[in-house]
């Protein structure tokens, strides 16, 4: 409990020097009056130079209404009924000062209302009521986008752990330079902005698929084609792109503080990511079937030759009148049996090979499968000359 009080005290102490002092709304101009003073008191300083140098620095001034707006009208003295002959024409009225850039186009009533909200937010900021103070500042920004309001809103958000919004409002506070802020506050805002950029991560996302919706951590970013570049908290993030008729793409990236990640999202149709493969080479089943047909054809030739040998044997036996077949006729018979047996074996093996080839052809039909979209990414090659130290060469960098 004690550490929590100390942390709150430190936070209030850090914020209080930068909290703007409340300013009253501008009042109507009154006729100037001159007051006489004693001669001996004129021109004397009210204090010593050393005392004046020790005055505390001013807090951040509240934004004032635009100087180009006309001041409230005042009652003028009645004019004489007739001009005097010796009267000279009045001098031309002084030209209005140029309008400040941060007040250009903002009506005076919006500026007055923004001032009231700004002062209410300042009171809440001094009391460390950061949530309510940020609400008042946001309401004031809706009326007048003044750098001082952005600056004080950033101070309130620092205590609410909103580094991304703090960076956004610091950028808006620095837009017009140090003129609308004090130099000390301007330098603080600039340095803290650089510190935040080192603690956060930057994400650059591009998508060229027309009509696709790009999401970061489930929140829509933009409609493709387009790109996004901004700061994110370090850690794990989910990137996604979706479109009807396309396969969604989801990426998970873990970013480190100060890292800049470039991500290119692209959607593909089912046909673009579909590839086909076979179990065997395309020619293998046909080769098996061809071997079976060739073997069957060879078996048919042996079958015909075997029948020829049987015919020769029968003719020899008929010629000798049923004698015991001599050796040449016995040889013809043996050759016929051998060729006939070989033909039967060939028919069997050839038929089996043909059937096997037919089965392989059926099993070797192309099968569809889906590839990873990362496989379609083309490697980027950059070539640059390398010079220095009296030597030269070429450097090639390949990104996958």
Image: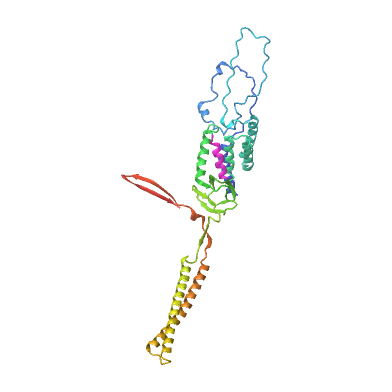
Image position of 272 (left or right of 392): right
Q: Which residues are magenta?
A: 162-175
Residue found at x 37% / y 45%: 385
- Is residue 172 depicted above or below 252 in this figure? above
Q: Nearer the viewer, residue 13 or 63?
A: 63
Q: Nearer the viewer, residue 239 or 182?
A: 239
- Give the image location of residue 41, x and y in percent: 56, 18
Q: Residue furthest left?
A: 390
Q: Nearer the viewer, residue 79 or 377?
A: 377
- Give the image location of residue 32, x and y in percent: 62, 19
Q: Is residue 133 magenta?
A: no
- Give the image location of residue 314, x and y in percent: 44, 87
The quadrant in which residue 170 appears is top right
Total label count?
0
- Give the image location of residue 347, x and y in percent: 47, 77
Q: Residue furthest bottom?
A: 323
The quadrant in which residue 43 appears is top right
Residue found at x 42% / y 84%: 312
- Is residue 14 depicted above or below 277 in this figure? above
Residue found at x 49% / y 54%: 376
- Is residue 95 depicted above or below 195 in this figure? above
Image position of 393 (left or right of 230): left
The answer to whether residue 337 shows anywhere in this view is no
Majority SS type along the magenta span? helix
Colour pattern? rainbow
């Amino acid at each position: 409990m004690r550490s929590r009080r100390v942390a709150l005290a430190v936070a209030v102490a850090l914020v209080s020097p930068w909290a703007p002092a409340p300013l009253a709304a501008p009042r109507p101009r009154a006729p100037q009056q001159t007051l006489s003073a004693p001669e001996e008191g004129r021109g004397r300083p009210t204090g010593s130079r050393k005392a004046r140098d020790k005055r505390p620095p001013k807090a951040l001034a509240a934004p004032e209404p635009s100087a180009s707006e006309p001041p409230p009208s005042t009652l003028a003295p009645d004019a004489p009924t007739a001009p005097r002959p010796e009267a000279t024409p009045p001098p031309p009225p002084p030209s209005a000062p140029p309008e400040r850039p941060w007040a250009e186009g903002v009506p005076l009533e919006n500026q007055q209302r923004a001032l009231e909200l700004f002062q209410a937010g300042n009171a809440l900021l001094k009391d460390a009521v950061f949530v309510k103070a940020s609400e008042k500042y946001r309401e004031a920004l809706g009326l007048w986008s003044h750098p001082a309001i952005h600056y004080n809103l950033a101070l309130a958000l620092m205590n609410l752990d909103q580094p991304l919004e703090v960076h956004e409002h610091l950028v808006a506070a620095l837009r017009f330079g140090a003129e609308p802020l004090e130099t000390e506050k301007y330098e603080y805002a600039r340095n803290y902005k650089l510190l935040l950029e080192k603690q956060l991560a930057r994400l650059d996302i591009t998508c060229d698929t027309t009509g696709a919706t790009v999401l970061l951590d489930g929140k829509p970013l933009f409609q493709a084609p387009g790109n996004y570049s901004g700061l994110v908290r370090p850690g794990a993030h989910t990137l996604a792109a979706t479109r009807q008729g396309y396969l969604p793409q989801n990426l998970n990236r873990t970013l480190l503080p100060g890292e800049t990640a470039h991500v290119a999202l692209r959607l593909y149709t089912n046909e673009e990511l579909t590839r086909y493969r076979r179990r065997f080479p395309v020619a293998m089943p046909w080769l098996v079937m061809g071997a079976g047909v060739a073997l069957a054809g060879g078996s048919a030739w042996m079958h015909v030759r075997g029948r020829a040998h049987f015919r020769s044997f029968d003719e020899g036996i008929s010629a000798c009148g049923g004698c015991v077949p001599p050796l040449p006729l016995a040889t013809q018979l043996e050759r016929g049996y051998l060729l006939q047996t070989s033909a039967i074996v060939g028919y069997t093996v050839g038929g089996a090979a043909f059937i096997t080839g037919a089965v392989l052809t059926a099993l070797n039909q192309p099968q569809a499968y889906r590839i990873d979209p990362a496989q379609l990414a083309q490697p980027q090659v950059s070539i640059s000359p390398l010079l220095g130290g009296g030597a030269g060469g070429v450097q090639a960098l390949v990104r996958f």
